[in-house]
Structure formats: C-alpha cells, structure tokens
Amino acid sequence: MSLAASAKLDKLVKQQYMKLPQGDKVQVTYIWIDGSGEGLRCKTRTLDREPKSIQDIPEWNFDGSSTYQSEGSNSDMFLIPAAMFRDPFTKDPNKLVLCEVLKYNKEPAETNLRDRCRRIMSLVEREHPWFGIEQEYTLLAIDGRPFGWPPNGFPGPQGPYYCGVGADKAYGRDVVESHYRACLYAGVEICGTNAEVMPAQWEFQVGPCEGINMGDHLWVARFILHRVCEDFGLVVSFDPKPIAGNWNGAGCHTNFSTEDMRKEGGLKVIEEAIERLAKRHRYHIRAYDPKGGLDNARRLTGHHETSNIEEFSAGVANRGASIRIPRAVGQDKRGYLEDRRPSANCDPYIVTEALVRTCLLKEEGEEPKEYSQ
C-alpha cells in the first residue's frame, strides 16, 4: 500500500515550530468550494487580533482561473466569510472560515449554492427545519485502492465490517477518531461515527442543525476530514460507488423534520411531506448529486440497501426505500423522516433546499429526467 508523500514527513519536527508563540497575531484559513462543486480549497492570512464573530473577518479574493471558476483574463473572485470555526490544526486563537464565492461582478458563482439556500431558509424560519446528515466515505491509499485492501485482490465479503471491531474488520480507525476529535474542537455539530458495510468505508453524522447551518457544518466537517487524511497520507473519497460489484456504495442520508413533525401527532405531517416528495422524485434525484443523477445511478440500483433510482418508495424501518420512517418515529407518532437518496458527494445546501422547497414551500412539478442513461 502506498501512502502520500505528506505522510512521510517527520511530524515531530513540525511540532517544534507549531509550539512557537505567535504573539498577538491570528491565522485565519479561508475555505471555499471550487468550480467542480465537490472540491475544497483553502488559503491562510494573518489578522492583527482574534476575530470574535464572522463580521470581524475581512473579505478576500483568489485566482478563479486556477479553481475552475473563471478565465485568466478576468480571474479575481471574492471570498465572503460565512461561518467561523476554531482551527484544530493550528489551534486557538486561530480560525477556520467557510466562505461564499462571488464573481467579479459580486454575483454568486455558479457553485455558490449557499447563497440561494440561505434565502430559501429565511422563508421558513418559523417552521424551524432541522437536518441531520449521515456522511459516508471511503478511505483510499494514494494509488486509489481502498485502504487496507490486498494489493492484488479483495478482502472477504461484506458482513463482519459494519460497526466492526478488530484489525481484520476496521480499516483506518485512527483517521476516524482523529477526525471526530478535530470536529469537536472546531465546534462542528458532529454527533457520531461508525464503520460501514464495505471495508475501509466509514460514516460520520452531523446534526441536528437548523436551516443553513446544516450545509455549513457538513462542508467544514468534510474539509477537516480531508486535512486529517492528508496527515495520515490517505485520500478520502465521497464517490457514491467507489468499487463496482457486490460492494455497498456511499450515501449522504439526510434526516429532516419541522417543529410540527416533532410535536404530538407529527406523523401525519411527515406522511403529508412524503406524499409531496413522491410527486417530485425526479427533481430530487437531479438535485442529489453534482452530476444531476448520473453519479447516483451507479449507486441507487435497488440493491445494497438502496432504492431504485427510477422509483419512489417509502416505509417504516425500510433501508431499501427512498424515504425511511424510523421505527421509533412510527411508534411515537412524531419525529423525522430520512431521505436515503442523496449521494455521498452531494452538496448539502441543495439537498436541504430541495427538501424545504417540496415539503414546506409546497412547490410542484418535476425537472427533466436527465439522470437516465
């Protein structure tokens, strides 16, 4: 198994420098989504004092021609600070800042889905929409092979790996636990983690978060995971079907509720929301991966704990359905629904926005069926 060159650097040498005092200065790392809609970029600047709120972080800019976001002849793009977190890599008082990207004319970049999501969430504040996202991912060696897999073969079939314990069942727990602690330090609303069904596949959960905060916290959790993997010399993949064949894919199951769903008798409100979701299945499929459904077509086959991409379904405790009502919710007659269709590489801003549009704003109609192959 080959590790990235970064893992071969002596981390103890680095610690000599990281322990040096930094005076009154503060390092702020600006994070943004690049033109692919999936990749994350970052760069760091020094501020003269510790920012106490997002308003204390100045706007900045970057070369969009190097991030698939502009042409070289007009390349400057703007970074607008949106959410601030503690930096688990350089530690207090330093910060991580998630940014929106604006074009040269101060209009949102095409991949700036946060701007539209924020405006939609502002329309439903009284409903108090809560989200919780279960982010699955796969750990890869630098050569693209799943971490811990035999170089010229495959591990044993699926079965013992889900929530597994032991060196022959859990591949890469050091990464998972480091990521968990880094997220807690940063202030990300991470609420759990577990090994998944395919070896070298894991999941972390973020939430509950209200409104726009869901997308902010998930994107920063993804950034932190990329950085942790960098230190270990591994690569994190959010590909929804990283290995073809009889192996589970990777999703981003999204739990959703409103204040009325969480109240006594909320199951009726959940069922009404599911009826609306059924009528907009194609719209949601198109929204739930960056390629308008093409990525998810490899995953949503009706096998390996997924629904069929062509059909909408719902059921209590049914992991093969598009929408699952957890058993406890069915018993309590209130709670939340779980949308199992979003792919691991989805943009959480558009996923949460789509749920609000369909379930709360009660929009109708479907987008063209562009995901069919």
Image (cartoon, rainbow, N blue to C red):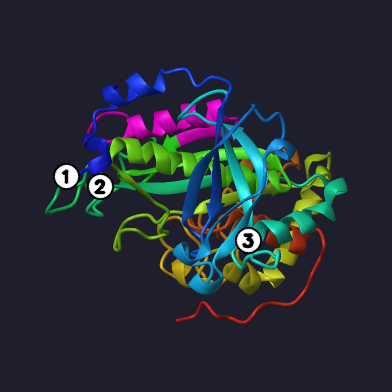
Looking at the picture, which amino acid does disc 3 mark? Answer: Asn
Asked if disc 2 and disc 1 are in contact, CB closer than 8 Å, the reply is yes
Asked if disc 2 and disc 3 are in contact, CB closer than 8 Å, the reply is no
Residue drawn at point x = 14 percent, y = 50 percent: 151
Q: Does dot 3 land on a helix, a strand or a loop?
A: loop
**Residue 133 part of the magenta-drawn span:** no
Q: Observer-nearest residue: 248 or 86?
A: 86
Name the residue carrying label 2.
Answer: 141
Q: Position of residue 41 (x, y in %)?
A: 48, 51
Name the residue carrying label 3.
Answer: 112
Q: Residue furthest right?
A: 126
Structural distance between the alpha carbons of marks 2 and 1: 7 Å
Q: Residue furthest left?
A: 152
**Disc 1: CA contacts within 10 A as few (<14), some (14-19) or many (>=20):** some
The residues colored magenta run 164-193
Looking at the picture, which amino acid does disc 1 mark? Answer: Met
From the viewer's perspective, tell me whether residue 212 is left or right of residue 240.
Answer: right
Location of residue 285 with respect to 227 vertically, above or below: below
> In the rendered image, which quarter is residue 362 located in?
bottom right
Q: Does dot 2 land on a helix, a strand or a loop?
A: loop
Looking at the picture, which amino acid does disc 2 mark? Answer: Ala
